[in-house]
Amino acid sequence: MQETTIHNAGIAKRKTRWGSVAFFVTLTLVTLVGCPIYLYKEGLSLFLGVLTLSFIFPTGMAITAGYHRLYAHTTYKAHPVYHFLMLFFGAATFQQSALKWSSLHRTHHRYTDTDRDPYNIKKGFFHAHVGWILFWKNPVDYGNVKDLCKLSLLMHQHNHFQAWAILAGAVTPVVIGAMGGQALGALLFAVVARLFVVYQLTFFINSLAHTLGTANYDAKITAKDNFFAAVMTNGEGYHSYHHRFPMDYRNGVYWYQWDPTKWWIYTASKIGLVRDLVRIPTEKILKARLTHQPSA
Ligand SMILES: [Zn+2]
Ligand SMILES: [Zn+2]
């Protein structure tokens, strides 16, 4: 429980994290060089393609619907089976525990665009995208996630994160791949390339959605609404709305806005996996939009 000690919410210190640098460089090289060589020699079987997609979709959704909208912002409640799926596939993304991720994200919302914002866009696009992980040490204030500490399965994932991550993100896909006679292919595509893709898509929420688009709901901060970013991030690109109303389970608040995460959560509510979805009343949304002068 040492990790759950409450620290002061401080300012990040510059520190090159060589382990993370080596990890990301390896991941990038294997994805951009190793995977094409494998494809050239072996081709892509239907089995491997389906296996890889079967990990890209739920792991991406575990970040946006699970880590972000269920845990960091508690925009809805979930059945224990749903909690397990979000924590299992969330761990498979190798993006820290749901508790740590949520704590950092709540800090981002509280201190947006300041030195206390872990992925402060004012330090540049690269910093907000991935530089904050590679070259900075961010203090984590677990005092802002006391509500989540009551969830026993989430705490188990936090306290045994490496075991969860390796089992969910590496062992499971490679064992399934081995059963289909393609263990190496599974390692390259369902583990390495999949991690690379889901990392990049997640990182765009902090970089692209704070750079390109229109600040429809709050022109005082850098969060923007951007259809292109929404397509890249499972619907998280309506970021001006999200920063104005983070408690809403929708980011693309209008029915026609591209937000697969909200459609997933809505569908899960219809089959009884989740409930109590929070929706901001339409009048309040319109008022917020009208009282803020949009700016690019
Ligand atoms: Zn943001
Ligand atoms: Zn958020």
Image (cartoon, grey):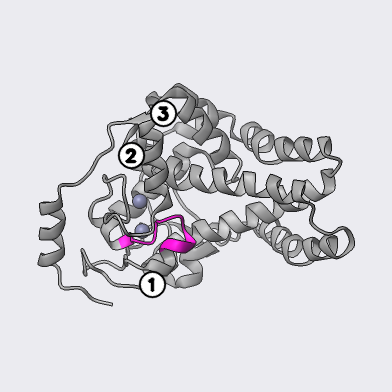
x and y, in percent, of residue 147 in the image: 33, 30
Residue occupying the point 63% across, 44% down: 54
Residue 256 in picture, x, y percent from top left: 32, 59
Look at 71% across and 52% down and name the residue there.
Answer: 192
- Picture quadrant where residue 70 is located: top left
Q: Residues within 10 Å of mark 3 (few under 14, many from 20)?
A: some
Q: Is residue 245 above or below residue 257?
A: above
Residue 67 is a magenta residue: no
Determine whether, in the image, residue 92 is placed left or right of residue 265.
right
Labels 1, 3: front one? 3
Residue 273 - label = 3
Q: Secondary structure at mark 3?
A: loop
- Disc 1 and disc 3 in contact, CB within 8 angstroms: no
Q: Which residue is mark 2?
A: 144
**Looking at the picture, does residue 72 appear above or below residue 196?**
above
Q: Is residue 136 visible?
A: no
- Going from N to C along the chain, the mark reached first, 3 or 2, is 2
Q: Depth check: give the residue in front, 46 or 188.
A: 46
Above or below for 4 versus 44: above
Query: Which structural element holds mark 1?
Result: loop
Give the percent coordinates (x, y) of residue 123.
Answer: 42, 70
Residue type for callout 1: Thr
Rendering coords of residue 203 (x, y %): 50, 60
Q: Write down the residue under mark 1.
A: 211
Mark 2 residue CB less than 8 A from any atom of ligand 2: no
**Magenta run includes residue 235:** yes
Quarter of the picture containing the C terminus is bottom left
SS for tag 2?
Answer: helix
Residue in front for this viewpoint, 74 or 46 = 46
Q: Where, by quadrant of the figure, is residue 231 drawn?
A: bottom left
Q: Which residues are magenta?
A: 230-239
